[in-house]
Amino acid sequence: MGAVPVVQPFDSIAAMPVLFDRLDCFQDCQDFFQFLNQQQCQLAAAALCPDSIISIGIDLGNLDPLAILSALIEIDRPYFYLEKKFADTAIAAGGQVISGEFDRDRFRQVRNFITDQSIHATADAAPRFFCQFTFFDNAIHAPAGVYLPQWQVVREGDRSTATLNLPLNATLADRERAWRQLQAMRSAHLIQWPNLRSIDRQMREVNRFRPAVISALKLIEQQQLQKLVLALAVDVAARHSFQVLQTIDRLRQQHPHCHVFATRTHSGHFIGASPERLLSVQQNGGSRWLYTDALAGSAARGSSLATDAALGQGLFDSPKERREHQLVAEFICDRLIQLGLTPDCPTLPTLLKLPHLQHLHTPIQTVLPSHLHPIDLVAQLHPTPAVAGLPSKIACEQIHALETFEREHYAAPLGWIDPVGNAEFIVGIRSALLQGDRARLYAGAGIVAGSNPDRELAEVKLKLQPLLQALV
């Protein structure tokens, strides 16, 4: 039999004797417990820290992670969901083994929390830490949160692989709970809910968006700002509690080119279909690569091929839209250069076409040295001018002054990191916060010289439509 890697975050990967076979071969609870007892005894004999985590891979076959999430969601316990239909991948996670919440120096503290953990994993296991941040670092609730889930399931193509994380000193109750959840996941399927789309269309705009745009244009004219991103928040009421899983299901069907996400926050269920990736870190060809995107500049889709092409060409040719996009691309490249990186950035953007909108898009990539942690990159890039403005500090001050609501997790990073340095973070835009029978929907627009308040208001209302259509 081969060797099982002991995964130590970033710095070292040692080897230890094989301690287990495939967990999915156990058919009853007694075998499962005997297996875990054996592993605990052998790992304890290796003089590991009692706080160490055992991470075990399990092949689940071809299962839908959203259905599996329905078996993992529990009241007031964290969960995470991210699906990229365009890449045929999805990840669901539920429960927590270890967690931390931070405010001051939040990015450094999250990095230290992850690198301080000791995780001992099978070859098939892929333990990931899930992170979520608020837009501002002085938010009321948990400006930064990170946790290692008890269960995570990753689907790539037609294969779903679960990872079970358990403390070395897991109790009998912990093991019983894990067994029950494994059985629930194996038989999980999505419930077919009745169509209860009774949304109260008397929606209330939380902030006065158009006057805020006029104020922003005055600041730009006075050369205090180059760009300011303002968000519109809309509160929606329903005659029933919103169905989180069904809403996610609708979003992933209706927006296959977006990152569909859901997570629990202190304020409720934060969900959305974001077109914007903040960063992805992947091993490729023996090197570690960073992939990120500049996404700014928007236009509607056309009702015919000819109209759609004309709208896209108009977006591409617009000096105002191209200037807004260029500010974002230059900011990202400059921030990466400050880290000593050499970003590869195409000269001209392309068009990213989504069901309701099309955007100017520039992919950016660079090789990463081993010493750079993904959280270093998140801290360096957030917030980009695509969600804040330029100069960043003044833009954030004006967002506080002109928006009459708390952004909380809107337009902030959320994503995952594994112990060997792979990561993916998206930007929480085109999003909503669900709280029982109430929902707050968010969308924003970038204001630059030449912006028209009426057109910007029309743009953000168009961005809200997919969320309204998905809410059930």
Image: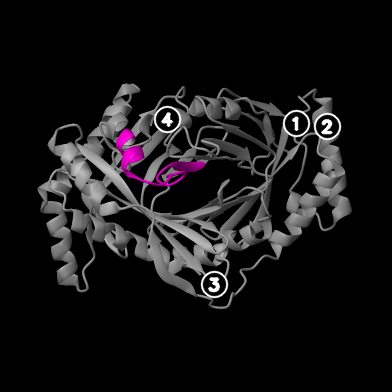
Q: Are marks 1 and 2 in contact (CB under 8 Å)?
A: yes
Determine which residue is flagged by label 1.
17
Q: Quadrant of residue 123?
A: top right
Q: Amino acid at mark 4?
A: Ala
Q: Earlier in the sequence, mark 1 or mark 2?
A: 1
Q: Earlier in the sequence, mark 1 or mark 3?
A: 1
Q: Nearer the viewer, mark 1 or mark 2?
A: 2
Q: Quadrant of residue 347?
A: top left
Q: Amino acid at mark 1?
A: Pro
Q: Nearer the viewer, residue 407 or 117?
A: 407
Q: Which residues are magenta?
A: 397-415
Determine which residue is flagged by label 3.
239
Task: Indicate the position of residue 300 as horizontal and vertical percent values.
Answer: 23, 63
Q: Nearer the viewer, residue 420 or 68?
A: 68
Residues at marks 3 and 4, CA–CA distance in whole angstroms: 41 Å
Residues at marks 4 and 2, CA–CA distance in whole angstroms: 40 Å
Determine which residue is flagged by label 4.
379
Q: Earlier in the sequence, mark 3 or mark 2?
A: 2
Q: Is residue 358 left or right of residue 368?
A: left
Q: Earlier in the sequence, mark 4 or mark 1?
A: 1
Q: Are marks 4 and 2 in contact (CB under 8 Å)?
A: no
Q: Residue at x 51, y 65 (%)?
A: 247
Residues at marks 4 and 1, CA–CA distance in whole angstroms: 38 Å
Residues at marks 1 and 2, CA–CA distance in whole angstroms: 10 Å
The label on residue 378 is none
Q: Nearer the viewer, mark 4 or mark 1?
A: 4
Q: Residue at x 57, y 78 (%)?
A: 194
Q: Amino acid at mark 2?
A: Gln
For label 3, the SS is loop
Q: Nearer the viewer, mark 1 or mark 3?
A: 3
Determine which residue is flagged by label 2.
42
The image shows residue 180, relative to residue 213, as above or below, that is below
